[in-house]
Amino acid sequence: MPPQDSHVGESASRNPPRPPEIRIDLAGLTHRGRVRPNNEDHFLVIRAGRYLEEVATNLPPGSLAQDTIGPGMAIAVADGMGAHAGGEVASLLAITTQMELLLALPDWILRLDESTRPVAERRALDRFHATHAAIVGRAAEDPRLYGMGTTMTVAMSLGLDLRIVYLEAPVAPSVITDLASALQHLG
C-alpha cells in the first residue's frame, strides 16, 4: 500500500475564514424629469466575486474551500448633467468605461486589508481619472457634444468595507472613504 500524503486535508485549515455574509437589497430607477424630453441618467448594479466550483475531483471532501471570498456589490448612478449637451452620452460613457476598465484588470482585489486597501483605492481613482479623460475626449471628437457632462457616484462593498467614489465630469474625480464625508460631500 502506498504511503499517505501528509499534506492531505491541510489545505482546508490554511484557507482563510469566509467573511461574514451581508444581505444587501438594491434597486434602480431613473426618470427623465420634468424639463428634458429624454432621460439622461443611467445606472448599473453588479455582483462580483471569485468563485470555485469543483467539476470533478478525487480530493477528500473539505480539501478545497468553497467560495472563500464572498461577492462584492456595487451600484453606479450616472446623472447626465441637464445643462450640458449630450448628458445621456456622458452618463452612458461613464458607466461603460468604468466596466471596461474594471474587466481589463488582470487581478481583482476582493478582500481589503492594510496591504490591499491603498492599491484598491489607487485603482479606483485611476479608473475615475481614465473615465473623466474618456468623457472629455469624446466631447472633443464631436462638436455636438461640446460641454457634455455627468456626475457619477459608485458605492462598492467588499465584506464589511464600503467605498464611495464620486465623479463630476468635466470636473476632476475624488475618492470618499467614509460615509460621513460622503453625506457631507453630496449635500
Image (cartoon, rainbow, N blue to C red):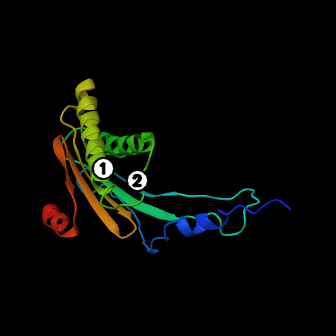
The location of residue 118, given as percent across then percent down, is 27, 53
Q: Are marks 1 and 2 in contact (CB under 8 Å)?
A: yes
Q: How many marks?
A: 2
Is residue 102 visible in the rendered image? The answer is yes
Image spot of residue 69 (x, y percent): 49, 63
Q: Which residue is mark 2?
A: 109
- Which of the 4 image quadrants contains residue 129? top left
In percent of the image, x 42 and y 62: which residue is there? 73
User: Please, is residue 136 above or below residue 126 in the view?
Assistant: above
Q: Is residue 49 left or right of residue 9?
A: left
The amino acid at mark 2 is Ile
Label 1 CA crowd tier, 10 Å (few <14, some 14–19, many 20+): few
For marks 1 and 2, the one nearer the N-term is 2
* Residue placed furthest toward the right: 1
Residue 180, percent from left and from top: 17, 70
Q: State the CA–CA distance, disc 1 to disc 2.
A: 8 Å
User: Could one spot residue 83 in this view of the protein?
Assistant: no
Callout 1 amino acid? Val
- Which class describes the residues within 10 Å of circle 2: few (<14), some (14-19), or many (20+)? some
Q: Nearer the viewer, residue 7 or 89?
A: 7
Tell me the residue that label 1 is attached to: 119
Front position in the image: 129 or 65? 65
The numbered dot on residue 130 is: none
Looking at the rendered image, the quarter that the C terminus falls into is bottom left
